[in-house]
Amino acid sequence: MTAARPTRCAKDEVKEIVDFLRQPARFSAIGGRIPKGVLLIGPPGTGKTLLARSIAGEAGVPFLFASGSDFVEMYAGVGASRVRRLFKEARRHPSCIIFIDELDAVGRSRGGSSLSHEEREQTLNQLLVEMDGFEPHQGIVVVAATNRPDILDPALLRPGRFDRQVTVSNPDIKGREAILRVHARKIAMETSVDLRTIARGTPGFSGADLANLVNEAALFAARAGRHTVTDPDLQEARDKVLMGVERRSITLTELDRVNCAYHEAGHAVVAALLPKADPLHKVTIIPRGRAMGVTMQLPEADRHTYTKEYLETQVAVLMGGRVAEELFMNHMTSGASNDIERATDIAQHMVCEWGMSELGPLAYRKPGNAYENDRAHAVSESTAQRVDDEIRRIVMGGYDHARWVIERNREAVRLMADELLANESLEADEIKALLDKAGARA
């Protein structure tokens, strides 16, 4: 039985490029060649540009930077000439890194009525020719970054051009802790600050989000007249990034405050009592961002896939606010608009993309995608009606589940709403104590 090979991460992939540039003879001695291109793929803020700079820094070679938009001009031939000039400058060095940021600006797929652009195509053609024109052992590597690999021209992605495609995803908990430590060196921070806890409470954050969090914490400390950043500063900064800035200047009527308290209590009770829901972190009726109140959940671990049960639970939690308004206030308000939109969006993904409905494991493309306007619509009218029926069934199933939970735990919702009206915010341990006092049950 052979041992399993370790999984290669983005760091391992680019580290090999550094070895190629440092010791080309080591690989050419056995007939290997330096990859001509490396494509970094990932969402915004994950550090693709920083990673490219670090490759050049570690290898000790020049770093030539260009943006995809630099090559897109209204004047014929200008973009292509800039590509030639960039590669001509690169050939003056024995080895170097050419970095093209936002490659999709110039590398969009050729053809198709919605994406066709003659000048862009000429620029792309020149880029393809230049990448093919490298000498066999010339130490020039083109590194490009994009967050839209789906619209790139296939000719760019074939072996011999961008030989490697490296996915740079949002960091996991260990990565987030390491990134926080890097940014924490730049500010005065108390030694008792637990960055591991902050990393656990920021799932899905990119490197840019974490840098912003640390900076916001430093600003909170400075405004309070302190000389060092403390744990509460970091937690307040995290809440600001996740939920928006507090807007205490807004004056709510007593009816709006009571309605908001019951709305958030409905969310919180459903989230606390359903076993598949993420743990509650905080509930507040202090306006933040565009929301009048917020119920915040934090997962115990990073999620990479979602089960059907988890998604149905999310829909039920989102419906909890509207249900509480109906049962305790005897009216409906527009405050549930975002909850309804998010619940419908989850249900649509379940039906149209993830095959989690009675329609089976099939993908149904909905019209309206800007990049698919020139493609045939793949859903018939009868099928579209069945898709709509399934989406409605999932959302209403979550609504009924939330109503069942809240009706069984009216006292818990009432107690939590009263506490929110008195104190405005509740932490996780306070929520648990209230639920135990009310004898809440799922």
Image: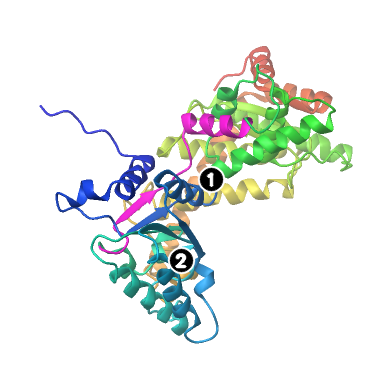
Q: Residue at x 43, y 64 (%)?
A: 384
Q: Which residue is mark 1?
A: 396
Q: Residues within 10 Å of mark 2 (few under 14, many from 20)?
A: many
Q: Amino acid at mark 1?
A: Met
Q: Nearer the viewer, residue 169 or 24?
A: 24
Q: Which residue is mark 2?
A: 104
Residue 175 within the magenta-colored segment of the rendering:
yes
Location of residue 339 in the rendering, given as x and y in whole percent from the top left corner:
63, 45
The quadrant of the image that shows the C terminus is top right
Q: Residue at x 66, y 32 (%)?
A: 266
In the drawing, does residue 62 fall left or right of residue 163?
right
Is disc 2 placed on a helix, strand or loop?
helix
In the drawing, does residue 167 fall left or right of residue 367?
left
Q: Over which residues does the magenta segment extend?
A: 160-184
Location of residue 217 in the rendering, given as x and y in whole percent from the top left corner:
71, 33
Residue 303 to residue 356: above or below: above
Question: Nearer the viewer's eye, disc 1 or disc 2?
Answer: 2
Label 1 vs label 2: CA separation?
40 Å
In the drawing, does residue 419 fall left or right of residue 272?
right
Location of residue 409 in the rendering, given as x and y in whole percent from the top left corner:
63, 23
